[in-house]
Image (cartoon, helix red, strand yellow):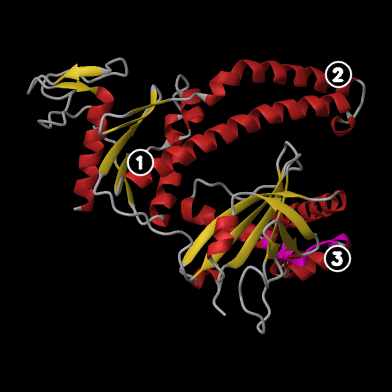
Amino acid sequence: MKTMSELKYHYGLKMCIHPSTKQKQIIKMNSDVSRAVYNAMVAIDKELYQLKQVKLPIDMVQDRIKELEQRKKAQNHLANHYYYMNHPYIDSYCRNMAMRSYKAAWNMFRKVHNAGTPNFHKKTYEEKYQTSGTYKNKKPVNMWTGSIRFVDNKHINIPKLGIIRVSGSYRKLLDNKDDIRIGTTTISKNAFGIYYVSMQLGSNTPFVKELSKTNSQVGIDLNTDNFLTTSEGNVVANPRFYRTIKGRLAKAQRKLSRRQVRAKKEGRSLRDSKNYQKQRMVVSKLMNRVRNQRNKFLDEMSITLIKNHDLVVAENLRSKNLLKNHALAMSISDVGWRIFLQKLEYKAELYGKTFVTINPKNTTQTCNKCGHVMGTKDTDKLTLKDRSWTCPVCNTYHIRDINAAKNILDKGLEQLA
């Protein structure tokens, strides 16, 4: 039987689930165990690092190092050390996946170096744990036969949780394919109290059909004034979802802060303070609304570009660097450039289209007709205030963003040539 990585096509599926009260308790238990295992691995590595700084051959130190290294190797050592992890409601794969997540965090640190080393996971109002689907050799491998499986179009079965009702736009996927394998599965609850299940799906056949060719190419210029401008001259307005509720959110957060101060003065726990929890849900609801609006907008924009063009070219923007400009940090965070580029990338691959990113250097300052770069040859460099300009060499009138989008498309074509 092939592993998930050996399968040719992969797909991510996220659905809303509706667990019972008992199932919510089991999810919380597994989430707590997952966080405890991860934090135990962090603590073990920190202690090992400190012990290995001792250069003297002290027997007690060496014995402690051996004990910690044995406990680190397998989840059974942790389960034997912490007996509550052997509770019948605890999924054994939950402990194993927590250790894999810890190792993946270290691998990411070694590969990228700016991700940071693994730190302790604090207890929050959110809950999350991962498990993995398994299959028996005698049964066919599909989404109806594993330990994590679909019972019908409205229910799934998850180890320890049993059958749970789900809702989401997944029925077309189930009706069209019968060779889907379910891999890593994440059960989560957000701060607003909504439960989700996310599945990693694998198959040897495509999940969706490739879109027909349109013989169209487009370059897009992302900015804060407008969300994007295309090389064809189309302009998409910036919806500014966060700014529309900024005042309401600030008022709700001030009220939440006052209730927090009052609860602490009276010596009450925040988790037991009903007024604080009610106001926390109000704040979470507002933030969740902005998140959902932005995600829906970016989904619609990305799929529209992919469907209508064979090639989409964009700037390789580094949002982290741009956020250092405090005057634009709020606008850049609100617009969601990085998420938008990620959506374009995976949707282009999914539907058989091409998406490339280019170096944004001088895309705004260059005349698309003659190639003159502003800021050179005794010409002034364009500023953010200059929304339109005339080339001093060829006297061509440019609208700033459309000219930049055309330069982005030309750079993309050169990169692919």
Residue 239 visible in the snapshot: yes
According to the image, label 2 marks what residue? 262
> Please, is residue 367 above or below residue 72 in the view?
above
Q: Is residue 255 left or right of residue 167?
A: right
Q: Is residue 162 left or right of residue 410?
A: right
Lower sequence index among marks 2 and 1 = 2
Of residues 145 and 74, which is closer to you in this image?
145
Span colored in magenta: 84-97
Graded by Cα atoms within 10 Å as few (under 14), some (14 to 19) or many (20 or more), the crowding at tag 2 reads some
Using the rendered view, name the quadrant where residue 293 is placed.
top right
Q: Which mark is residue 86?
A: 3
Report, in whole angstroms, how far the alpha carbon at label 2 lies from the one at label 1: 47 Å
Q: Where is residue 181 in the image (x, y as percent from the top left)?
A: 59, 69
Q: Quadrant of the N terminus?
A: bottom right
Residue 49 visible in the snapshot: no
Q: Does the magenta stretch include residue 410?
A: no
Q: Residue 316 carries which label?
A: 1
Lower sequence index among marks 1 and 3 = 3
Report, in whole angstroms, how far the alpha carbon at label 1 lies from the one at label 3: 48 Å
Q: Where is residue 254 in the image (x, y as percent from the top left)?
A: 72, 17
For the residue marked with disc 1, what is the amino acid? Answer: Asn
Of residues 332 and 311, which is closer to you in this image?
311
Graded by Cα atoms within 10 Å as few (under 14), some (14 to 19) or many (20 or more), the crowding at tag 1 reads some
